[in-house]
Image (cartoon, grey):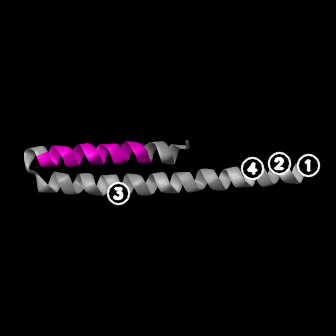
Amino acid sequence: MNRDEVEGKAREMKGKIKQAAGDLTDNSRLHGEGKADELAGKAQGTVGTAKRKVGEAVEKIGKTIKK
């Protein structure tokens, strides 16, 4: 996992916690912030996964060319 994937997961979990806190306290603003954080975390994680896969593909091509 790369930095974006890890940070994305952390942000996603933070968002879920905020949503739960918003639900417990009946605070719709906090719940909304949590939902936004969760979605942003998922997006960041997806970008990180894409970066990692591109890097792996480039590395594989480089190894193939060396042979």
The residue carrying mark 4 is 59
Q: Which residue type carries mark 3?
A: Leu
How far apart in space, not on screen, are marks 2 and 4 (Cα)?
Answer: 6 Å
As helix, strand or loop, the secondary structure at mark 1 comes to: loop
How far apart in space, not on screen, are marks 3 and 1 (Cα)?
Answer: 43 Å
- Packing grade of label 3 (10 A; few <14, some 14-19, many >=20) is some
Return the mark for residue 39: 3
Q: Is 18 contained in the magenta span?
A: yes
Return the mark for residue 67: 1
- The residue range painted magenta reads 8-23
Residue positioned 71% across, 54% down in the render: 57
Labels 3 and 1 touching (C-beta < 8 A)? no
Residue 33: quadrant of the picture: bottom left
Labels 2 and 1 touching (C-beta < 8 A)? yes
As helix, strand or loop, the secondary structure at mark 2 comes to: helix
Labels 2 and 4 touching (C-beta < 8 A)? yes
Q: Is residue 14 left or right of residue 9?
A: left
Residue positioned 75% across, 49% down in the render: 59
As helix, strand or loop, the secondary structure at mark 4 comes to: helix
Q: Which of marks 1 and 3 precedes in the sequence?
A: 3
- Packing grade of label 4 (10 A; few <14, some 14-19, many >=20) is few
Q: Position of residue 47 (x, y in %)?
A: 51, 56
Return the mark for residue 63: 2
Q: Position of residue 13 (x, y in %)?
A: 33, 43
How far apart in space, not on screen, are marks 2 and 1 (Cα)?
Answer: 7 Å
